Amino acid sequence: QVQLVESGGGLVQAGDSLRLSCAASGRTFSVYAVAWFRQAPGKEREFVAARRWNSVGIYYANSVKGRFTISRDNAKNTVYLQMNTLKPEDTAVYYCAASIATMSKYDYWGQGTQVTVSS
């Protein structure tokens, strides 16, 4: 099992920055990839960014490319999502997810953290 705990959400204004954290624990040696997803009210959950746990390979949704950065602190087993130039349409609950085998299906999920961007 892998446990994921997100933090760092909050209320910010358009144009501000925010950094989300996802602390992983448990069988982290089995993790192949980590990702961030988000779900806005009334909308389906959508992919935001992903990276392989122990090798290169980073991917972003077009809507956040150039504004968001996914990174990892190996020593802390923590994944970050740096969000810059936030827009009201970035408002959503952000979820961290981990996969043990592929970047297209995620096996473990965090509880989510709310990000609200006011205009």
Image (cartoon, grey):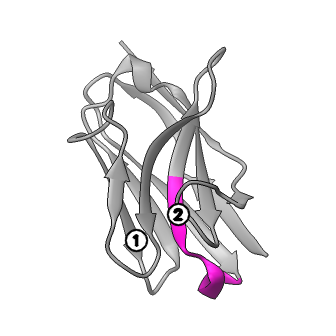
* Residue 34 shown in magenta: yes
Q: Could you say whether the residue bearing mark 1 is in a helix, strand or loop? A: strand
Q: Can residue 56 be seen in this view?
A: yes
User: Residue at 33% across / 60% down in the picture?
Assistant: 58
Q: Can residue 8 be seen in this view?
A: no
Q: Do the residues labelled 2 and 1 touch (CB within 8 Å)?
A: yes
How far across and how far down the image is residue 38, in percent? Answer: 55, 36
Say if 75 sits above or below 57 in the image.
below
Say if 50 sits above or below 9 in the image.
below
The kind of residue on which mark 2 rests is: Val
User: Residue at 47% across / 66% down in the picture?
Assistant: 79
- Residue at numbered disc 1: 72
Q: In the rendered view, does 80 fall on the left or right side of 57?
A: right
Mark earlier in primary sequence (2, 1): 2
- Residue at numbered disc 2: 34
Q: In the rendered view, does 114 fall on the left or right side of 80?
A: right
Q: How far apart are marks 2 and 1 (CA)?
A: 9 Å
Judged by depth in the image, the label closer to the viewer, 2 or 1, is 2
- Based on the displayed image, in which of its 4 quarters is residue 61 positioned? top left
- Based on the displayed image, in which of its 4 quarters is residue 75 positioned? bottom left
User: Residue at 66% across / 61% down in the picture?
Assistant: 5
Q: Residue furthest right?
A: 1
Mark 1 Cα-neighbour bin, 10 Å: few <14, some 14–19, many ≥20: some
Which region is colored magenta?
A: 27-35
The kind of residue on which mark 1 rests is: Arg
Q: In the rendered view, does 57 fall on the left or right side of 37?
A: left
